[in-house]
Image (cartoon, grey):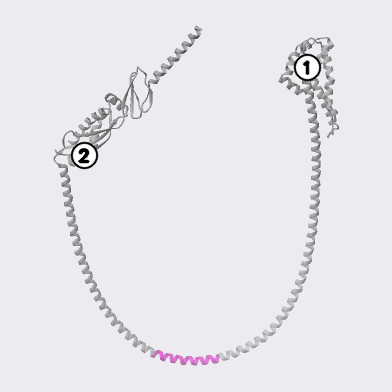
Amino acid sequence: MGEFISTHGGLIITIIAVIVLLCIIGSGYVKAPPDKAFIISGIGKKARVVIGKASIKIPFLERLDKLDLGLMPVDVKTASAVPTADYINISVDGVVNVKVSLSPEGIELAQQNFLNKDRAYIVAVAREVLEGNMREIVGTMELREMVSNRQKFADKVKENAAPDLANMGLDIVSFNVQNFTDSQGVIDNLGIDNISKIQKDASIARANADRDVAVARAEANKQANDAKVAADLEIAMKNNDLAIKQAELKKVSDIKKAEADAAYKIQEEEQRKQIEITTANANIARQEKEVELETQKIAIQERRLDADVKKQAEANKFVEQQKADAFLYSKQRTVEAKKYEDIQNAEAELAVRQREAEAALYAAEQEAKAARARAEAAKYAAEQEAEGIKAKGLAEAEAVRAKALAEAEGLDKKAEAMQKMQEAAILQMYFEKLPEIAKAVAEPLNNVDSITMYGEGNTAKLIGEITQSTSQISNGLLDGMGISLKDLLSSVLTGKAIATGINSVDTTADVIGSDDGQTAIDDNL
């Protein structure tokens, strides 16, 4: 009992120690958000910075400090008016966004200056630095330049203040100037001056535009008048040219008319003369034509007579030719008809012979198929009969095997008695069982009415298989007993005991009862 309490007490103490250790480790687990920097210090030369990830702080040995990394807006205003480069007092209002630098040097400087400080403290420090730098830049620029280019002023202030803030671990993200003001209204006057200047420039531009319009209008009127005068002059000149042209055309027309009248009379005389000549020529030509006509009539009569004789002869010739062609065509058609009839008869006889040959071939093929089918049917019947005989023999052999197994189990029970038996008893038992084995092997054949064997030597083969089965069963029995028949007979004849075989009967019986023994018996069967 004391040992039990001691053992379990130690286990409980160990569990408590593990739980305490886990609680201590769990209390040191820290996870920093992306906008916070967790500074873990206490062990080691340099503090560890954790941003946006988890870490372990060793309790009691390390401490945890936090640094804000978020964007901090700073409203920067000059506390009093600051004189510009042109000695005009103005006030400046701007907005600056700053944040802690994420570089290793910046984080280290920020740790030294703002660790565990709130935003208000950081903003106040940054405002003082930015205000001082802004006052410096105001003193270096003129008012007009600052008002007209605020971005240049903001860039200068940012450039001037960035090193000072970087020494504290801060970066300037943006700088925007909100407003410039002054107590004397100079900035407003600059606006008025610009307005007056703009109005003056507008009035001058308007006057110049009116002048240009008047000049353009006068020039347009002048050009219109010049165009009108030139047009009238051009019209007068064109009218004058037209009158001259009309007179010239009238003169030419009269000349042409006189020439036409004279030419008409001349032409009329020429026409009359030509008519007379033409009439005389026509009479001569008519007489010549009459002579030619008579000559042509005579020639036509001669050709007609000649044509009649030739046509009759050609007609007779054509008739004879047609008769000869008809007789020749009739002979050719008769020969071709006889040839065609012979070809048709030959083809018909050839077709008949081909069909008879095909029919004979088809009949032979069908007879061969029928013979093949009968042979296959006979083969299938023989195979089925052989399969039946084989199946029956296997079933009877299985019965023999079961009987042998049963006898083997009987032998197992007699194993103790067999240890004291001599060789003669073993031989007696073997020879007593041998006729029963042979009878069991041959008994299935008594149930078979007839066996049809195909091929030569099958009868001897069947008898040999039966004899072999008997030998295998008897040998299997002796092998199962662990005895060699040859050695046993030799031992009986020489008078030697087979102590070794007898002593192995127990082992043999165990083997027969096991799976390996069953397999051996199956193989022997």
Give neighbour class at mark 1: few <14, some 14-19, many 20+ (Cα, 10 Å). Answer: few
The answer to whether 352 appears left or right of 159 in the picture is right
Q: Residue 179 has which mark? A: 2
Report which quarter residue 78 is drawn in: top left
The secondary structure making up most of the magenta span is helix
Q: Is residue 339 left or right of residue 154?
A: right
Report helix, strand or loop for mark 1.
Answer: helix
Magenta stretch containing residue 281, yes or no?
yes
Is label 2 in contact with label 1 (beta carbons under 8 Å)?
no
Asked if residue 392 shows in the view, the reply is: yes
Judging by the rendered image, the residue that carries numbered circle 1 is 410
Residue 499 is situated, as x and y percent measured from the top left of the image, at 78, 10
Q: CA distance from mark 2 to mark 1?
A: 124 Å
Q: Tag 2: residue type?
A: Asn
Expressed as whole percent of the image width and height from the top left, the position of residue 382 reads 81, 36
Give 355 or 425, whichever is nearer the viewer.
425
The magenta span reads: 265-288
Q: x, y (%) of residue 491?
A: 82, 12
Residue positioned 80% across, 45% down in the render = 370
| Rendered image: mark on residue 261 | none
On screen, residue 327 versus residue 305, left or right, reads: right
Q: Is residue 212 above or below residue 280?
A: above
Relative to 1, residue 90 above or below:
below
- Residue 298 lies in what quarter of the image? bottom right
State whether residue 98 is above or below residue 20. Answer: below
Whichever of labels 2 and 1 marks the residue nearer the N terminus, that label is 2
Looking at the image, which residue is at 22% across and 40% down?
A: 150
**Residue at 78% across / 11% down in the picture?**
417
The one nearer the camera, 121 or 492, is 121
Q: On the picture, is 113 further left or further right than 26?
A: left
Secondary structure category for the residue under label 2: strand
